């Protein structure tokens, strides 16, 4: 049975609603971009050192994005 809102070409998706997938991916990637920008400012500024926060935050981002990528993005990619 085909539902036009959720096409059957990607039957193994973990998060079926594409808008939810996009929203979660956007939130995770904004978190990563913020880490990058704050890290660049931290390197350029001599007045403070945020490496104690940036290193764990970067590790958390890598872990979250990797899990999301393997669990959701890869499973949602149609097979050729």
Image: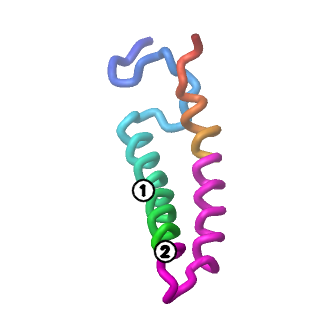
> SS at mark 1?
helix
Q: Position of residue 57 (x, y in %)?
A: 59, 68
* Residue 62 to residue 13: above or below: below
Neighbor class of circle 1 (other Cα within 10 Å; few <14, some 14-19, many 20+) is few
Which residue: 60% across, 63% down? 58
Q: Where is residue 41 in the image (x, y as percent from the top left)?
A: 46, 72
Q: Where is residue 7 in the image (x, y as percent from the top left)?
A: 42, 18
Instruction: Look at the image and tell me in which quarter the C terminus lies.
Output: top right
Horizontal arrangement in the rendering, residue 68 relative to residue 44 (left or right) = right
**Label 1 belongs to which residue?**
30
- Of residues 49 and 68, the one drawn nearer to the viewer in this rendering: 49
Horizontal arrangement in the rendering, residue 68 relative to residue 15 (left or right) = right
* Residue 44 to residue 14: above or below: below
Which residue: 63% across, 46% down? 66
**Label 2 belongs to which residue?**
44
* Residue 75 to residue 29: above or below: above
- Of residues 30 and 77, the one drawn nearer to the viewer in this rendering: 30
Q: Earlier in the sequence, mark 1 or mark 2?
A: 1
The segment highlighted magenta reads: 42-66
Where residue 70 is drawn, which disc sits there?
none
Neighbor class of circle 2 (other Cα within 10 Å; few <14, some 14-19, many 20+) is few
Horizontal arrangement in the rendering, residue 18 relative to residue 67 (left or right) = left
Which mark is nearer the camera, 1 or 2? 2
């Amino acid at each position: 049975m085909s539902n036009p809102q959720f096409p059957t070409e990607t039957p193994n998706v973990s998060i079926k609603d594409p808008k939810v997938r996009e929203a979660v991916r956007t939130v995770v990637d904004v978190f990563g971009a913020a880490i990058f920008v704050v890290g660049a400012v931290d390197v350029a500024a001599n007045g403070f050192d945020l490496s104690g926060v940036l290193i764990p935050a970067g590790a958390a981002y890598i872990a979250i994005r990797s899990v999301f990528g393997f669990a959701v993005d890869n499973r949602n990619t149609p097979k050729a």
